[in-house]
Amino acid sequence: MVEHVVVVGAGVYGAAVAASLARRGARVTVVDAGAPAGGTSGATFSWTNSCGKQPRTYHDLSVAGMDAHRRLAADARGDWYHEDGNLEWAADDAGREELRRKVDGVLDYGYEARWIDRAEALALEPGLDPGRVPADGIAHFPREGWVEPTGLINHLLATARGVEVVRDDAVVDLEVTTVAVQAVRLASGRTMSVDAVVDCAGPQAARIAALAGLDLPMRNTRGVLVRIAPVEGAVSRVVHAPEVHARPDVHGRVLLHSLEIDRAARVTETGEVDVELSAIDTVVEAGRALYPSLRTATVHSVKVGERPIPDDGLPVLGRAVALPNFHFAVSHSGATLAVHAGDLVAAEVLGENHDETLHPFRFERF
């Protein structure tokens, strides 16, 4: 019988798994090397979508994740979930063809998407500079949106009765027999006996798996986000323009991102991650060009996160066959998937069978 579960990681996955386990009656300890939402979850664009995700099983899982967010936010009257839609357009023929293939693909799956022109785009997003918006060929995905991860994590952990959260205390070892994990040891020296462990450690998931004798191949990447100081009403939804991605953020701030700024993150001689100032300037200027109301706004902060990406790009979810009380909840797109996928993983920890959904995402595929 599973009574005590240790969840490693206090990001969106860890919080979702812990809340689901607690709701089902388990005693849960969440442990993190830092603070809840202090890792990748606090440094993510957190765009909720299933746009272009392949194969179909991954698409369907993401759609279910969006539905789970919608239900949770409605039931809890939560202010962390924003389903305001997404606008996307491309700058050249190759980009437009790629976008058209993506739209055609999701329409075949029954996903909501439509083509709109400049006038419709400006009606939806009046803060855009009309001169930066193409006359047509703009994709609108009305059910997409964004999540404020810290608010979501705080809600999940605050409402999970009896969950102990241990912060600033990394997992340094697992006591493992040939058939099970028996205990978790922390940097502080504390050792906890366990009935099950769930690896929600994000970019550190491979390290935790290795402590259990499991080889989880990952190809993590860095992501850089630029927060612009409060400009109320400047941006009202997710926008993917060719030179910059933008979305609203809490307290009236605006979040900017681009693929180019991700590549500008580098490790310094002291081992810290830094971002080239010229790259920050470039993405800020692109944001100001797209939204004239940002032209006098200043940079609030720049944050670098490490995206956890399993080697084939798909989530890793559920129990490990070789070590049945060790479970995974690791993926890119955690902001979209965590509430739904975390609930499936938690149910499996406590003996429910969700193999039909989780089978494509098992660790053993590697």
Image (cartoon, grey):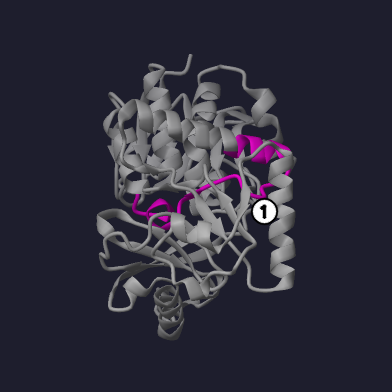
Residue 125 drawn in magenta: no
In the picture, measured across the screen, residue 24 lies left or right of residue 262, that is left
Residue under pointer 1: 311
**For residue 275, what is the image quadrant?**
bottom left
Residue 41 drawn in magenta: yes
> Camera-side residue: 179 or 348?
348
Look at 39% across and 79% down and name the residue there.
270
In the picture, measured across the screen, residue 39 lies left or right of residue 142, that is left
In the picture, measured across the screen, residue 281 lies left or right of residue 76, that is right
Q: Which residues are magenta?
A: 37-62
Question: Looking at the picture, does residue 330 appear above or below residue 260?
Answer: above
The image position of residue 327, as x and y in percent, is 55, 33
Quadrant of the image for the C terminus?
top right
**Observer able to see residue 8:** no
Look at 43% across and 54% down and name the residue there.
237
Q: Amino acid at mark 1?
A: Asp
**Observer able to see residue 63:** yes
Question: Looking at the picture, does residue 24 appear above or below residue 145?
Answer: above
